[in-house]
């Protein structure tokens, strides 16, 4: 079982407008949809859709929390919810004829007792897990090193942890030696000390992540595919170009990597699966949904290129 | 008791941003508030705050409906809710450092059975009412002549009806001879056959409303105050200039007119009360809330000017 920890789930609301969004004006929303969302929740959806056993652990609160409960009760996703007082957040995407504008509510604050209840539930689930996935933002009240704590607790059960985050959340997690981290380029830039202009730069930054504690790193590079720096080698993987909505592509990559890790596939196959599923997610307008046929076709066509280890830094040049 | 019928209540959500709203970009909401809203609901809040007996009748559905129930349970507002299946709508106001941008969800569709249940509840409340207030938009599924039906049912109990609406909703209501209609200038423009450039134009348009069936008409003209065309004369009323948020000023005007009508004040006093409360509402950042001291001060300073009846139309000029 893959244990998917979603600390800041969201009700994803989509508002469609017939005309453009104009700041300062009043708009009639012509249609709206809402759906349970949040990064690890989307991972759990994708795994469940593929028949891979997983359990979603999430704190939920108030009306928006109830709406997520109701939404997921209609799916096959196995869930373990911790009731909290604060209202689960919403994300609002306003889609007009030319743009998609996103408004992300902050998460509900978790009290110390509520965070302890999440940790207790997590520890109760660990003995039946094969791998732990944690991704996305932390709600207020959760310690900044939450992913370090979760990774360290998983290690006590010899469980690999997959962390998809950036900034201080990722940096803190590295101290507990997660099995795999999956930042995107923007998140990597927040941690790396050097530039990220070339594939060689990205490989060098990936090695920095390993030096900071990660055992393996996969960096998602948008339409350029992904760069992996692992214990057994480095690769660039890229699927055929797909146009669409990149939201959710990172979650699809995480789902594919988690499933392939549990299946103990060799790294090249994990990366092919990841690049293919991530590209297929771009073609799907809904985050957390991927067409299996397109996924197979794109995975079969992934180009995998081994990458050399980074060269030693050039000796500093003396000032003239 | 003033019966306040709110057919399309809303959860009013306010998102505050630290920086400007930029279409096509992602924004972090720095703080958010939500509050039960909707035009007649705000009228009921204001009446209750002043100790004036009223009952709010509204259909409510799903999570958003429950949130309104919970919000109003913490107030003294007497309520009579009809449970419906569709989710009560939200309105989202995005406040950035320079602008307020509004996104209005459509209302939940009411089934024929749900609309019949609202009508049944309304008829059960009429015998204890002194006046009926109906204002705001109609949700899908409610007949376009809903305010005509409600006004006619009130008339069977000899009850005056106060209708705050525009367009086809107001036009339909006029057929049932409501005691008072209160369009704003934009709503009046949708019904009037002539221009609305001057006070004389507005008085003429007000007489048109009377000719179409209204017994009295008060037109809210923003910072220019209000123009009243009544059975006993016409007036222009204007309070001292106040800057702030005009949202909710119309609801405050309706609340003041409703209270003054039930108290059987003469028209000049009703209009002073309306203009003063409406101006005080502008000073308050929250719709449905008015500072009583400011209201008293502004009401005392209202300038009331009697207006002449409109002159007969000039004979058509012959083409040269």
Image (cartoon, coloured by chain):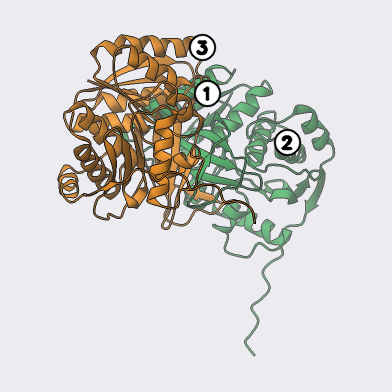
Chain colours: A orange, B green
- Horizontal and vertical percent position of residue A206: 39, 38
Answer with mark 1 or mark 3, whichever residue precedes in sequence: 3
Whether label 3 touches label 2, CB < 8 Å: no
Asked if A318 appears above or below A88 in the picture, the reply is below
Give the distance between the C-alpha atoms of the residues marked 1 and 2, in whole angstroms.
40 Å
In this view of the protein, which residue sits in the foreground, B13 or A12?
A: A12
Q: Quadrant of residue B260?
A: top right
- Horizontal and vertical percent position of residue A198: 41, 52
Q: Chain of mark 2?
A: B
Whether label 1 touches label 2, CB < 8 Å: no
Q: Are marks 1 and 3 on the same chain?
A: yes
Query: Is any part of residue B125 visible from this angle?
Result: no
For the point 30% across and 43% down, which residue is it?
Answer: A286
Q: Which residue is mark 2?
A: B277
Whether label 1 touches label 3, CB < 8 Å: no
Mark nearer the viewer, 3 or 2: 3
Element marked by disc 2: helix
Q: Quadrant of residue A209?
A: top left
Label 2 Cα neighbours within 10 Å, binned few <14 / some 14-19 / many ≥20: many
Q: Which residue is mark 1?
A: A140
Element marked by disc 1: loop
Q: Chain of mark 3?
A: A
Assign the N terminus of chain B to one quadrant of the image.
top right
Assign the C terminus of chain B to one quadrant of the image.
bottom right
Q: Which mark is residue A112?
A: 3
Give the distance between the C-alpha atoms of the residues marked 3 and 2, in whole angstroms.
45 Å
In this view of the protein, which residue sits in the foreground, A218 or B122?
A: A218
Label 3 Cα neighbours within 10 Å, binned few <14 / some 14-19 / many ≥20: few
Give the distance between the C-alpha atoms of the residues marked 1 and 3, in whole angstroms.
11 Å
Query: Is any part of residue B77 visible from this angle?
Result: yes
Mark nearer the viewer, 1 or 2: 1
């Amino acid at each position: 079982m893959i244990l998917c920890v979603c600390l800041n789930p969201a009700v994803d609301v989509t508002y469609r407008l017939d005309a453009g969004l104009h700041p300062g004006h009043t708009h009639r929303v012509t249609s709206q949809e809402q759906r349970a969302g949040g990064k690890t929740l989307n991972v759990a959806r994708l795994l469940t859709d593929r028949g891979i056993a997983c359990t979603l652990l999430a704190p939920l609160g108030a009306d928006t929390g109830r709406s997520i409960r109701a939404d997921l009760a209609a799916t096959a996703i196995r869930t373990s919810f911790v009731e909290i007082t604060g209202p689960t957040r919403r994300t609002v995407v306003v889609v007009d004829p030319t743009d998609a504008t996103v408004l992300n509510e902050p998460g509900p604050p978790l009290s110390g007792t509520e965070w302890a209840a999440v940790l207790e539930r997590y520890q109760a689930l660990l003995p039946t897990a094969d791998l732990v996935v944690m991704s996305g933002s932390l709600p207020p009240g959760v310690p900044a090193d939450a992913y370090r704590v979760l990774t360290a607790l998983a290690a006590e059960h010899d469980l690999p942890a997959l962390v998809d985050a950036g900034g201080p959340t990722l940096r803190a997690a590295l101290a507990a030696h997660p099995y795999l981290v999956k930042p995107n380029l923007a998140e990597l830039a927040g941690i790396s000390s050097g530039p990220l202009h070339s594939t060689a730069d990205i490989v060098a930054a990936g090695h920095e992540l390993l030096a900071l504690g990660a055992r393996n790193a996969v960096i998602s590079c948008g339409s350029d595919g992904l760069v992996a720096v692992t214990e057994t080698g480095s690769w660039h993987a890229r699927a055929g170009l797909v146009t669409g909505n990149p939201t959710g592509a990172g979650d699809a990559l995480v789902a594919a990597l988690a499933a392939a890790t549990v299946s103990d596939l060799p790294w090249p196959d994990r990366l092919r699966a990841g690049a293919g599923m991530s590209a297929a997610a771009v073609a799907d307008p809904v985050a957390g949904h991927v067409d299996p046929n397109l996924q197979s076709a794109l995975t079969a066509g992934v180009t995998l290129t081994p990458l050399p280890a980074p060269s030693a830094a050039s000796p500093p040049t003396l000032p003239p």
